[in-house]
Amino acid sequence: MTPVIALVGRPNVGKSTLFNRLTRSRDALVADFPGLTRDRKYGNGQLGDKAYTVIDTGGISGDEQGIDAAMAEQSLTAIDEADIVLFLVDARAGLMPADQAIANHLRVNQKKTWLVVNKTDGIDEQIGMADFWGLGLGDPRPIAASHGRNVTTLIDEVLEPF
Ligand code: GDP
Ligand code: MG
């Protein structure tokens, strides 16, 4: 079975940018406007001899009306479909209420979850990650999806059990 990796997080954290890098596809719509990916989007990738499937999601609205309102239905579905969840947060924006809401859901979910701190290019990684240690989702993993920084290393580790 090909492992399925879901990319979740609030809009604008860089999910589609990472999707494009992992699938080398231009399918996902990447823009400065949050939430442009309206439906789940599937792509395939390969690292070494390991194939994987990635699901991009439009993200979670971030209007902080509780977990049910805050989690977009498609993101919940993507989590259900996935073997691995990459929870993306934004090093530059820091911790936002929507991140907390998503984290609360992921903590009780059975899926293997990685806390991925994106946009660490041009900033100190340790400072960029500082906000996120307290989320209770393990060690934050710094990447820069748009530059590819640490991405291969992360995916290699993520796919290790598969
Ligand atoms: P999504 O809404 O989570 O899918 O986010 P996008 O992939 O559409 O990215 C939102 C914005 O963040 C775009 O302007 C991207 O170019 C930018 N972005 C994504 N990844 C990075 C990164 O690693 N570093 C920086 N500086 N910007 C990024
Ligand atoms: Mg997107």
Image (spheres, rainbow, N blue to C red):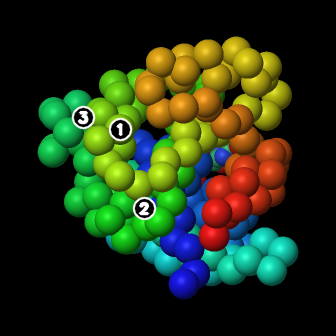
- Residue at 15%, 45% (x, y): give it: 68
Q: Residue furthest front?
A: 161
In front: 41, or 114? Answer: 114
Q: Earlier in the sequence, mark 1 or mark 3?
A: 3
Whether residue 90 can be seen here: no
**Number of the label disc, if any, that sits on residue 52:** none
Disc 1 to disc 3, C-alpha distance: 20 Å
Residue at position x 61%, y 30% in the image: 139
23 to the left or right of 111: right
Dot 1 or dot 2, earlier in sequence: 2
What residue is shown with label 2? 57
Between disc 1 and disc 3, the foreground one is 1
Mark 2 surroundings: few (<14), some (14-19) or many (≥20) residues within 10 A: many
Residue at image mark 1: 107
- Where is residue 8 drawn, in percent x and y? 44, 52
Q: Residue 92 vs residue 71: left or right?
A: right
* Residue drawn at point x = 16 percent, y = 34 percent: 66
Q: Which residue is mark 3?
A: 63
Residue 78, placed above or below residue 118: below
